[in-house]
Amino acid sequence: MHLEILVEEPSAKEALDIIVRRILGRTHSFVVHPFNGKPDLLKKLPNRLRGYRHYINENMRIVVLIDADEGSCLALKRKLDCIAHSVGLTTKTDNCASCHIMNRIVVKELEAWFWGDIYAMNRAYPRIPVGLVNKSKYRNPDAIGGGTYEALEREFKRYRIFTAGLPKREVAKNIAMHMLPERNTSPSFKAFVCGLQDICQIS
C-alpha cells in the first residue's frame, strides 16, 4: 500500500516522516505533503483530491491530518468528508471495504501527541523531567487547557531549553525520533495509528 498524507504545516511533516515509518514498517510506502497552515490546506484540498481521483487505485490511499484547534472535531470531520464526496471519493467514515481517504483530526494540536509521550520528550530534551507524567493537567494530552503548543512552550521556557519561542520543526523532529506508538496516551494519536493499520491491513 502507498499513502499520500496531507498535513497542515512543515512541523507535522517532520514528525510524521518518522512516526508513520515506525507504524508501517518497510512494507508500505508513503509521502507526507505539508501545506502553509490549516486555511491553506482546506482551501486547496478540493483541487488536490480531484487530481488524485484521476490515478488513485486499490493500492493507494489518501490520509488527511488536520488540527482541531478550538473547533468542533465532528464538524471538521464532516467538512473533510463532504469535500471528499464532492469530488467523487469515498472516506473511511463511509465504512466501505476499500475507501479512498482517511480523514483524521488531531485534538487539539500536533503538540498533544508529544504530550502523549513525555518519555520521548525527556529523551530528546533531558531537562524536561519524566515526572511531568504525574501532573494531573498533562494526564490527558488531548484535554490540556490553554493549548498544547502553549503548554509545551511554557515547560521548555521553565527548564531553560528554548527561552525565545519554540523552533517547531526542530522540536517536532527531535521528539518524534524517540516516540513509541504503543506508549502514547493521546486518544487522537491512538485513533490515527489504528486508522493507518486498518487501511494498510496491518494486524
Image (spheres, rainbow, N blue to C red):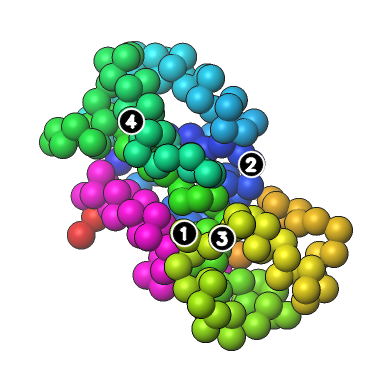
Query: Mark 1 to mark 4: distance in Å?
Result: 20 Å
Q: Earlier in the sequence, mark 1 or mark 2?
A: 2
Whether 103 is drawn above or below 183: the answer is: above
User: SS at mark 1?
Assistant: helix
Q: Is residue 151 visible?
A: yes
Q: Which residue is mark 2?
A: 10
Image depth: mark 4 or mark 2 in front: 4
* Residue type, mark 3 in image: Gly
Q: Quadrant of residue 2?
A: top left
Q: What's drawn in magenta, residue-wise?
A: 178-201
Image depth: mark 3 or mark 2 in front: 3
User: SS at mark 4?
Assistant: helix
* Residue at position x 43%, y 63% in the image: 186
> Residue 38's mark?
none
Image depth: mark 1 or mark 3 in front: 3
Between 66 and 123, the one nearer to me in the picture: 66
> Residue 145's mark?
3
* Residue type, mark 1 in image: Asp
Where's the N terminus, which quadrant? top left
Where's the C terminus, which quadrant? bottom left
* Main secondary structure type of the part rendered in magenta: helix
Q: Which residue is mark 1?
A: 142
Q: Is residue 44 magenta?
A: no
Q: Is residue 192 magenta?
A: yes
* Residue type, mark 2 in image: Pro
Q: Which residue is mark 4?
A: 78
